Structures are given as C-alpha cells and as structure tokens.
Image: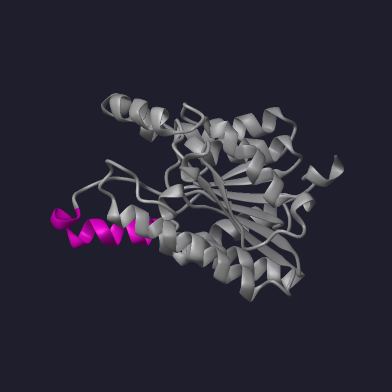
Amino acid sequence: MDMFSLNDTVCFVTGAGSGIGQQIAVGLAAAGGDVGCFDRNDNEGLAETVKAIEALGRRGIKVIGDVTRKETLESALDVVESELGPLDVAVNCAGIANANPSEAMEESQWDQMIDINLKGIFLSCQAEGRRMLERGKGSIVNIASMSGVIVNRGLMQVHYNSSKAGVIHLTKSFAMEWVDRGVRVNAISPGYIATPMNLRPEMKNIMAEFAAATPMQRIGDPKEIVGPAVFLSSEAASFVTAVNLLVDGGYCAW
C-alpha cells in the first residue's frame, strides 16, 4: 500500500494546536511526513502536537502566526522549508465557530468569521500553492464543513455556513486554475465531530440531539478525519482534485 505513504514528504498544517488539525498533523507524520505545525498561539496543545510527531520518529516544528495575515503565513512557510525542505502537502484546518441569530448579528461578528474561515483559507492556499507551482507538484486539503452543504437544524450560524460554503467553492476554483500545473486541491467536510469546541458542558444536550440525527447514531472522532486527509494528500489520490469529501456519518444523505 505504498500509494498511501507520505514517506519523506514535507507537510504544513494550520490549526495544528487542537482538534482536527492536531490529529491530522500527527496522522501525516504517522504516514511518513515531516510536519510544520502552524497555530496562532504558542500553546501547550501545539507543543503536544510536535512532541507526538517526534515520538513517531518524524521531524516536527511549531510556527506561530495568523492565517488572516499574509506576511505571517509566508514567514512560517519560509521557516518550514528552511528546516524541513520543499513543501509537498498542506492541510488548512484553522477556523472558528460560533452562533447568533442573523437579525441580531453584528457586522464585526460576520467579518471575523469570514476573515478567518474564508480569507484565511484563501491566503493559506495562495502562499502554499505558489511554492508548489514553482516545482510543479503538491497537494492542498482544506477543511470545510457539511454546514457548507446543508443548513444545520437548531444552529443559528449564517456566517459560519456561508464561510464554509465559500471554502468548498474556493477549493474547486483553485483546483481548476492549477489542474494542469501539478497541484491538486481538495476539501474535506466533516459532520459533527467531538472537538474541544463541541465538548463544552453547554453543548452536551445539543450534541446528543446531533448524534441521534446522524444515520450512524453517533458523533465522529477527530481521528476519523485523518484517513481522508492522508488519502487526499497521497499518491493514492493522484487523479482526485476539486473534490469535497463529506465525512459526516451519513448525515447529508437524509
């Protein structure tokens, strides 16, 4: 199964300090990659990610920055390439989520969501893609959400849904611009996942409702996003681009 191997590849993961991003960063290392772990804070979670990567015998480094600022992304990628080598794989996981009735939502709340979740993905892809295009090869995976495909019952998050729908179409647009230049761009849209954000005490009841509404009758584990990310990043997906892969326990089928 060498086609799934990421041996000796250089990877870059945004939002690597917690949740899905952390699991994917460690998963890429388990598949053989060296990983630059990017987050906006130099926190304990980011250090744990790097420690887990090193425990697998791979190289991991932490780089700090803000996905809404082009210069910090460029600087982070400069560090990654100088310490690990030319970039082969990027997975963009950085994002936020919150809710508010649309009629009461402040413009600043809308702007922050779009800046981080959509503009942040654009700037990340742009910075990563430029380096990959120079070499004529690479894979980028963007973490979107099933909320970019459906409207979640009981969640008032017009800004979040719009940002994730944008990520899906942004992914397809990048993929088609670069389809003949060796760079593949795909998206993963998770369903309800047991991330730290969703495990807060105040979320307990609504998460139980979400589990009941999911055909598989449960919430997903962040580790269940790792396999799809490794697949899309590897040669096993060499003929796959512009895809939005739903990983939702069947939720969007109902």
Question: Which quadrant of the view contains residue 196?
Answer: top left
Who is closer to the viewer here, 162 or 152? 152
Q: Residue at x 50, y 65 (%)?
A: 169
Task: In the rendered view, tell whether residue 159 sits above or below residue 252.
Answer: below
Q: Which residue of the protein is positioned furthest toward the front in this rendering?
A: 254
Q: Main secondary structure of the magenta part?
A: helix
Q: Residue at x 29, y 45 (%)?
A: 98
Who is closer to the viewer here, 28 or 230? 230
Q: Is residue 180 visible?
A: yes
Residue 191: % across, % down: 47, 41
The colour scheme used to paint the residues is one colour
Task: In the rendered view, tell whether residue 47 sits above or below residue 143.
Answer: above
Question: Which quadrant of the view contains residue 207?
Answer: top left
Task: In the rendered view, tell whether residue 88 sits above or below residue 247.
Answer: below
Residue 227: % across, % down: 66, 39
Q: Which residue of the protein is positioned furthest toward the right in this rendering?
A: 2
Quarter of the picture holding the N terminus: top right
Q: Which residue of the protein is positioned furthest toward the left in this rendering?
A: 104
Q: Which residues are magenta?
A: 102-117
Q: Is residue 68 visible?
A: no
Magenta stretch holds residue 110: yes
Q: Residue at x 47, y 45 (%)?
A: 252
Q: Residue at x 28, y 62 (%)?
A: 111
Residue 197: % across, % down: 37, 35
**Total numbered circles:** 0
Describe residue 163's horizontal placement relative to residue 201 as left or right. Answer: right
Describe residue 41's horizontal placement relative to residue 177 as left or right. Answer: left
Magenta stretch holds residue 199: no
Quarter of the picture holding the C terminus: top left
